[in-house]
Image (spheres, helix red, strand yellow):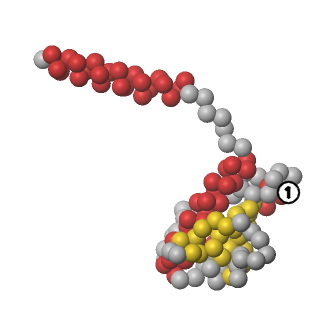
Amino acid sequence: MKYFKLSCVILGFLIFVGLFVPSLVNCPPLNQNDEAELDIEMLQTAISVYYKKNNRLPENLGNLIDGSIIYIQRLPKDPWVIDYQYSIVSADSFLLWSKGSILNSDALVLSAYKYEGNSFIKVVIDKSGFGT
């Protein structure tokens, strides 16, 4: 009986902490560029799965939601409500960027990916190694 009461007290404390402590933590909202980066990472994951299934990159982002296999539930729009841009650079590399970040004079949100080993990795764009 003693352990039962102690267990109830501990359980009550954990419920209290779980309900009230998160409201005390102040997390700042993401800015638009951070939201775009997260969307681009999600798109990259869907493209990666498509690549592994089909042994090629999708021709466009619409290929991720069309067909017998759906690689992503819906294509996100960037925080400025514009479609994300996608460009194939070579058979195993591509670019994803937010057009809205350019049109709204924010910093360009652009990511380049290249297939190495068994997955796509984010790479720095330079003249020498990307897309060759």
Binning the other alpha carbons within 10 Å of mark 1 as few (below 14), some (14 to 19) or many (20 upward) gives few
Looking at the image, residue 83 lies above or below residue 19: below
Quadrant showing the C terminus: bottom right
Looking at the image, residue 1 lies above or below residue 29: above
Instruction: Evaluate whether residue 75 shows in this view.
Output: no
Type of amino acid at the residue the image marks with label 1: Leu
Q: Splitting the image into 4 quarters, where does residue 45 fall? A: bottom right
Q: Residue furthest front?
A: 128
Q: Splitting the image into 4 quarters, where does residue 36 fall? A: bottom right
Q: Position of residue 72 (x, y in %)?
A: 54, 64
Q: Residue at x 54, y 62 (%)?
A: 73
Q: Residue at x 40, y 22 (%)?
A: 16
Q: Position of residue 127 (x, y in %)?
A: 79, 75
Answer left or right for 76 relative to 107.
left
Instruction: Evaluate whether residue 25 shows in this view.
Output: yes
Element type at marker 1?
Answer: helix
Answer left or right for 132 relative to 121.
right
Quadrant showing the N terminus: top left
Asked whether 80 or 110 is in front, the reply is 110
Answer left or right for 111 relative to 17.
right
Q: Which residue is mark 1?
A: 103
Q: Residue furthest left?
A: 1
The count of marks equals 1
Answer left or right for 22 relative to 60.
left
Q: Residue at x 58, y 70 (%)?
A: 120
Q: Residue at x 59, y 75 (%)?
A: 115
Q: Position of residue 43 (x, y in %)?
A: 61, 64
Q: Position of residue 123 (x, y in %)?
A: 67, 67
